[in-house]
Amino acid sequence: MSQVSWSIIALLLSSILAFAQTNNAPGRPGNDSHWPTAAKVGFGTANTLRSKVWFTLADGVMTEAFYPRLDVPNTQCFQFIVCAQGRCETEADDMIHQVRILNSQSLSFQQVNKSKSGAYTITKSYTTDPARPTILIQVNVVGITGAERLYLYFDPSLNNSGMHDRGWSSNDTLFAADKDVATAVMSDGRLTEMTTGYLGTSDGLLQLRTKGSIVDKYTRATDGNIVQVARISRPSSFTVAIGFGSSSGQAAINARVSLAKSFARVRKEYDAGWLTYLRSINPGPAAYDRQYKIAALVLKGLEDKTYRGAWIASPSIPWGGGPNANEPTISGYHAVWARDLYHVATAFIALGDTAAADRALNYLFQVQQKPNGSFPQNSWVDGRPIGGGLQMDQVAFPIVLAHQLNRTDRYTWRKHIKPAADFIVQNGPATGQDRWEEKPGYSPATIAAEIGGLVCAARIGEINGDHQAASAYLKVADNWEANIEHWTVTSNGPLDGRPYYLRITENGEPNQAAKIEINSGGGTYDQREIVDAGFLELVRLGVKVPHDPLILNSIAVVDRLIAQTIPAGQAWYRYNHDAYGETPDGKPYDGRTGIGRLWTLLAGERGEYELARGNQAGASKLLDTMSRFANEGLMLPEQVWDGKGPSSAGTGTGSATPLAWSMAQFIRLAQNLQAGRNLETPNVVASRYSR
């Protein structure tokens, strides 16, 4: 009999023996699952297409890891537990956290967690293998003696759901699987006392806290919210590999090969890949070098590696995404919005990476666009729609982007641009939802995008000899430009004696005392009382001049009502009475009693306006403000605290960090400052209306 045959027999006997010795965990399915905080301080992936895995960091631990796509989170938490003298401390809950950027030319992060007593420190460095979907964590522990025991804690939530996972242990490896996603956790620190149980009913941490040790070593748990725990036999310095694959066997191979390759070698390859990318893009202002580079790397890393051109909004789920994470129904912000993707693409153009911007446009037209020319509210990375809202700016922005990229070929015109422009003509200028995804009606920001889209479409139509369509688009655009004040500017509003732009009017009658209900329990108000700074899009897109008296007066109203100066600088709320945020006492958003906080990207939008009116110093000051909103890992958040909550003013809230739109806005403003003008303003629009 051949050696191979004996090996197969030995493997079968080993499997039979392991099955016979199976000790199934009780307490199925376990407690509800919940996605972790959206306030990430680190995000990483290799700059290769082969390594389809991403990690996120928050609260001293690794949170969501995505595989094989950026809309498929697979983990809740990976952390360590220290036990001694009947007490167990977890990194997330019982230690003081710090994050470091190991290399500002790479997405290389390190977490340092110290016990509150100062007795010990756990230092973890992260990387992913550029050749395969494996996360490697190099761990160094100082201060643990023979009296303490160190355990790893892994809470998988495979395939975007906390339930329905199955897990088991075999030899030196912890396995978990759910359909076509599997993980394998192993370490050169040697795993012992391995157990797989159900969260809150039979998990290893529960045993450690109630019994002081792993008394019941459960080898298998199925169809539930599983948690895996194992003791590290050699706890001073070791590496953990978390391999992913379409099967447990493939996940184990990936983990073992990466582990054998060594952390040092893998990280060297990982860092080299990002350095190569940085050398290919336009440099930013020297004063913002670290923030600029990290913003560029994060943006590059947020592109899906299967559906190229699909950039998710954030690798996070705001405030944990709801009552539980049991089923694969929550998209959070790991989805694609055409509006966000437009802003990301313009940032890549500013970076000089037009290939990335082209991929974004290809995705918009070839994957997201509907047969009628419109775009979904948002989608999974494969293009399946999620929300059912119609946002007309998201129909217009792809046209503006096509014009900026000089995508004027006949096929793109007939197949994508003309259908989108026709849809705008037939369904605008009112929108089903404004850019905040809430209210229907006449929005200055939306109409600015529609006018810009139609003028850009007209130019592309002329290039393709379709003069009839071009003429029709310009006629509509001119009409809407002439009427935007009639639809959105009030002359009898209570906020000022002079006319000013409103956030939105439902019926296009801005002088009526019509009621507007603020989403998420924000209350009901006279529409003339609600303002935002969306009218600045009229300037950015070339529809209005920056010194237009209505623009100037509306800025005065906005600055009086929704601007706030905090230590980091001047910042803005989306609109007055916004309710999309934490509750007054800082608890997570509940959809009923929240308060919207200051938005990072709005400082960047105001900076672009200041640049448009020639105030370079003011624009630079706002870029400073944006940079101060970054956390320890230089991640820029969606919202920051305003001084009216549990955290310091200017620090990120629990909504979403990093937000791709915020990172893109920072890059774009930085490059615009260097150029002395707003590079993304379409000249064809500005030359028609504002020059």
Image (cartoon, grey):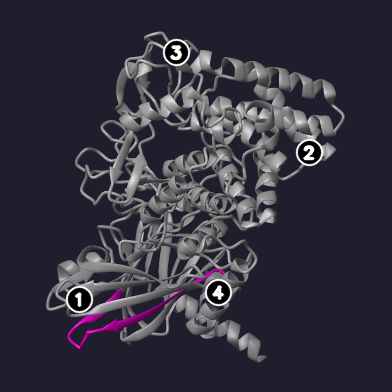
Q: Earlier in the sequence, mark 2 or mark 3?
A: 2
Q: Earlier in the sequence, mark 1 or mark 3?
A: 1
What is the three-letter code of the residue carrying label 2?
Answer: Thr
What is the three-letter code of the residue carrying label 4?
Answer: Tyr
Q: Earlier in the sequence, mark 4 or mark 2?
A: 4
What is the three-letter code of the residue carrying label 3?
Answer: Pro
Q: Position of residue 105 (x, y in %)?
A: 52, 70
State the CA–CA distance, disc 4 to disc 3: 55 Å
In the picture of the structure, the residue carrying the numbered disc 1 is: 83
Magenta-colored span: 132-151
What is the three-letter code of the residue carrying label 1?
Answer: Cys
Q: Nearer the viewer, mark 4 or mark 3?
A: 3
> Which quarter of the picture shows residue 332?
top left
SS for dot 1: strand
Label drawn at residue 270: 4
| Viewer-closest of 329 and 63 | 63
State the CA–CA distance, disc 1 to disc 3: 65 Å
Check the picture and name the quadrant holding the C terminus.
top right
SS for dot 3: loop
Does residue 140 show up magenta in the picture?
A: yes
Q: Earlier in the sequence, mark 2 or mark 1?
A: 1
In the picture of the structure, the residue carrying the numbered disc 2 is: 412
| Viewer-closest of 464 and 271 | 464
In the picture of the structure, the residue carrying the numbered disc 3 is: 510
Q: Is 416 located above or below residue 37 in the figure? A: above
Q: Assess disc 1: are there few (<14), some (14-19) or many (≥20) residues with their C-alpha within 10 Å of its C-alpha.
A: some
In the displayed orientation, state which residue is furthest to the left: 85
